[in-house]
Image (spheres, grey):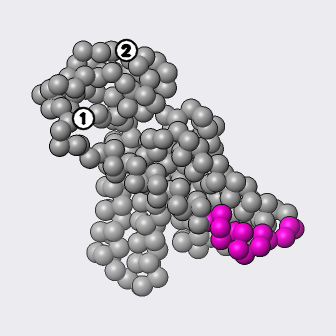
Amino acid sequence: MGSNIRIFKPGKTGLKRVLKWVVVANAALAAIGILVGGSSGFVAQIHGTSFLLVATAASLAAIEQGRFRSEIKYLWHVGSVCSIAIGAFAIALVWGLEPPNAFARPVGSLAVVALAATYCAVISAIGDRGRLRTICWAGALGLSCYVLALIWFDIGVLPGRLLALIVVGQTACSLLAVIDFIASRRVPADSPSPSDRKVEYCPYCGSKQLTRSNGDLECKTCGGQFWALDN
């Protein structure tokens, strides 16, 4: 493609609008808690609801940003549903819901899936190297399946040292993905000026199959949309 670029911006207008309303609702709840006052329990409920709304919105935003990766596309839909369900259930707990003990396993399972989807989405968004990204995904999904098995079945726990080694390896891979992400955003001193660079690759998957529609660029391979801003 022949457009000069300076930065890439994903087309996430709908997501931004939703997040803005979440911020407004969160601020309104915080203000209510401060102005109304009353019992400390009521104020704690207001602020607890505010915090849970932010946490749920952050999870959904992360999943939305990472869903352009099609390798585990079904996880994004399941993760979004689980995140919303856990957020709603946690808010209900804050306001006095007393669920029966039978809810423990299903709710715990929803929480595990929501956390796994959020983590995989973050890695999806920041992981540039396909092999490292796959290792992080596999580790997270493997650990999640193990926790789900502990929740639903009477199985033995892995030896402490083996489990510690797995967690250390997962943490190391996650940090490598973060380091790669930070390094990829640093512009070398001898890099060409923005006006000399051309849009040739999709910033999401690296494909050269790009099309232009209404001023936006769209990747034929992964469906990602972005803008090319000229100087």
Contact? badges 1 and 2 (CB < 8 Å): no
Circle 1: residue type: Ile
Q: Does the segment drawn in magenta span residue 182?
A: no
Q: Which residue is drawn at 58% across and 73% down?
A: 96
Q: In this view, does 99 lie to the left or right of 209?
A: right
127 or 146: which is nearer to us? Answer: 127
Give x and y (percent) for residue 29. 36, 65
Give x and y (percent) for residue 90. 57, 65
Q: Which residue is drawn at 40% across and 49% down?
A: 180
Instruction: Say if 177 sits above or below 189 in the image.
Output: below
- The residue at the far left in this view is 231
- The residue at the far right in this view is 154
Nearest to N terminus: mark 1 or mark 2: 1
Q: Does the segment drawn in magenta span residue 162?
A: yes
Give x and y (percent) for residue 114. 59, 54
What residue did someone put label 2 on?
211
User: What label does residue 218 carry, if any?
Assistant: none
Q: In this view, does 163 lie to the left or right of 193?
A: right
Q: Residue at x 54, y 45 (%)?
A: 133
User: What label does residue 7 carry, if any?
Assistant: 1
Q: Which residue is drawn at 22% across and 19% down?
A: 3
Q: Which residues lie in the magenta part?
A: 154-167
* Res. 219 image quadrant: top left
Q: Is residue 130 left or right of residue 99?
A: left
Instruction: Say if 126 sits above or below 74 in the image.
Output: below
